[in-house]
Amino acid sequence: MIFPSLKRLGEKMINLHFKVLDCSFLRQQFRRAVTYDGLHSSMSSQVSAFVKKLSPIKVKGEPKAVEEAARIFQEGKFDAFTLSKFAEELNRVGIEMHCGGKGEKEIVEIYFVSSSKVNDLPLFSGQKKRSKEPVFAEETPPLRSQTLRIKVLRELYRTLREIGKGQEDFELELKNLNEILRSYQELFRVSKNKGNSKIPFNKGHFFPFREEEFYLREIGGLLLELREKIKKDQTQKEIVQQINGFLRIIKKMVGGRELREDIFSRLSYLRVFLVKKWMKEDLEVPKDVSQGVEELLKIKNSRIVEIVARILGKRGIRSQLALERFLSPSLEPAEVLPDSELAARQVVELIQRKRKITIYGDYDVDGLVGTSILFKALGELGARVDYFIPNRFREGFGLNLEVLKRLKEKGTEAVITVDCGTGAFQEIKTLLSWKIQPIVTDHHTPPSQLEGFRREEKFYLVNPKLLPENHPSWNLCGAATAYKLASLVYQNLGKDMASLEHNRFGMLALATIADVVPLLGENRAIVKRGLAVLREKSPLPIWALRKAGDLGEISTTTMAFGFAPMINALGRLEDAHLVVELFSADDSSLAIKIAKRLQAANERRKLIERSILEDALAKIILEYPDFEKANSLVLWDEKWHEGVVGIDASRLVEAFGRPVLLFSFGPTKAKGSGRSLPGLSLYRALQGCAQHLAKWGGHEVAAGFSIEASNLKELETKLLLFRHDFSKSVEKLLEGKRLVPKIAIDAEINLSEVDSPLFRALRQLEPFGAGNPLPNFLVKEIYASSLGFSAEGEHLYARLSDGKVEKEAVAWRKRYLAQTLSDEKKVNVVFSLALDSWRGDFAQIEILDVKENEV
């Protein structure tokens, strides 16, 4: 008798060459094969002998016992059924990998270590024979343990995913689905009829536990998809009826809620599991700061003075001088940037001698804005100038030697970089050897080797990171750095700066906000001035983007979450050079045409983002059996778009509260993006497993990296090893502590104080963003009523009341908070106050978190 699922498992094990075996992979695949092939509880001597071979504590090289098992599985034959003892052994066994040696001599040691037993799934344990009506062992009441229930739900989820993919044994799997659905219906019926006290009922819910509700809703969604696929097939009527019955059960379990929800709503539900730490610190505010708030902001209400002073104190403003600089930031002279005057003179000489200049910019908003500013400014000054924006997929980030060679062949005599080039030593050296003048404008942190390289090679590097860290210009973005160079070129040629300043500051504000640089020092002056320019009269590119994207009022929020994603979309999916055409356009019809293309690309990006999130969530459930306990998540898929995985990693960090790394890969190379959260340095975590990475770079909460191999099998092996070692690196950094997202509370206030006077005072602390976040407020002991959801089910709306006043509130992508908000019990709420971009000058309460207990 042939058992196809065991056969496929054997083939998978052999294809891995036994160099790396993931314990969850082996255990889950075997359990699935046993379930699918309908094996029972008897056991052959052949299997008994094999089980004994799993006993060695340590195996070096290829584990022969497992190899032998794979050969047996590959044949798909057994004389006796269900390998229950073998299943138990696999569930007891875990595998830990350790790498030693280098290159081809690398040895992977596989340790078999003890782990908790998770045998006796109700799907097949206790069954004496295969029958239409499953019989369960009396000594094991069905689904009594929550841990067991979750494992059963996960296994059903796995089965449905495989069926949904349309595997070759589709008919067999449908038959097994039928058996599984019958089993579940019986389990729930038995549980309900017996009145099992360990499975409480509450308002129609069979399960009160949030983890189980999450799995049930995911399973319900898969069943709906599967039903759509097979309901037209008249031969599958019985299975469609079974699915409908099971869907009714699930819907009752989850309180009648919709089962087919948007991926963002489902991810927001996962945040239920996250316990956030509220950080409330009482600071003594210096008297001169309070006096300064009262005098400079002209606030007469002493309570509002106290609140604003506390907010400023949390931002490190502890003197009246610091307060004055914060409230009235100033622009710094361009000359303060190292090499800026020398670089400007060199550009002037290039213009006067009619040398061909190529501006080489990055493909993000910062690089594109900076490129367009330099391109248009130098063109207005009569320069022979063109630009090049690298393709993310062909050339990648930064200077590329092949591109530089092509530019040389086209007659380029000088290359000015924007938002890249600080560490491109080899490329700069090559340009100099070709007698091409490199001028680098960048804002990234210089590598330690820079000083030595600059002693050997003479070139101009304009980078604010070469200033002292406390300098007001230290945090400038790449576009602002390029603008400084352009302004000095204007000055050297005696040209009027007024038009350059007025037309460019709005774009500089956009680049500064989009690049998430701290809004401190000179950046505050740039954004403040830029937003004022944009509100007075938007330049053509901003007008076109706003019209094409139907964006709201000009604010830091619409810049960050409206304009920036539209501009970035083309570079993420295709080629970003069109954005420079938009930023340089003088014709409104051309500007609208390009802006509409950007908007269309952004919509495609959203679809791709959702698709990746769907896949990633399924992979987490299937590949991380205890994802609630995992310290990190590392996932990969050949279908994922490398230009979008970084966004999805950020979404998953929000949902799971731990570092997430996503790879897109081809036959020999995997390229990935990672995101972390404050409290765990992604840079240091990657340092701990950098031996697996061909290239990598990043900072505390974001990074990019790649893994290379000679073929696909080796690449998948390396990805498994990297996942294991990255987890170990994170574990070492955490030192046994749990990574908990934190929410800083600036002030505790009463709900009645959330009014126009407070909002007007807060507006004077703008612009808000990185380095100067929106203040977070705490209100205690309030009720919530009139709960509602947005059309897509992602956002939550509520009315907050303390018994005296009521306020409208919204919780963006936090639908899960509806489980805590109530009009029957008092809760504590942390929120921020933001400008409602659709209703103008209106203070909107944005709920961040809710707790029933004290802070």
Image (spheres, rainbow, N blue to C red):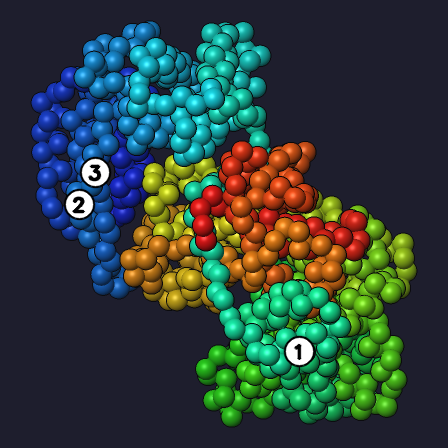
Tell me the mark number nearer the camera, choosing from 3 and 2: 3
Percent x, y of residue 455: 51, 92
Tell me the mark number nearer the camera, choosing from 1 and 3: 1
Q: How crowded is mark 2: few (under 14 residues within 10 Å), some or many (20 or more)?
A: few
- Observer able to see residue 84: yes
Residue at label 3? Answer: 116
The span from disc 1 to disc 3 (Cα, nearest Å) is: 63 Å
Q: How crowded is mark 3: few (under 14 residues within 10 Å), some or many (20 or more)?
A: few
Query: Residue at horizontal 44%, vertical 30%?
Result: 213
Tell me the mark number nearer the camera, choosing from 2 and 1: 1
Q: In this view, does 320 lie to the left or right of 650?
A: right
Hey, which quadrant is residue 818 in on the image? top right
Residue at label 1? Answer: 291
Query: Residue at horizontal 33%, vertical 7%?
Result: 132
Mark 3, secondary structure of its residue: loop
Mark 2, secondary structure of its residue: strand
At label 3, the amino acid type is Ser
Q: Is residue 791 left or right of residue 582?
A: left
Residue at label 2? Answer: 113
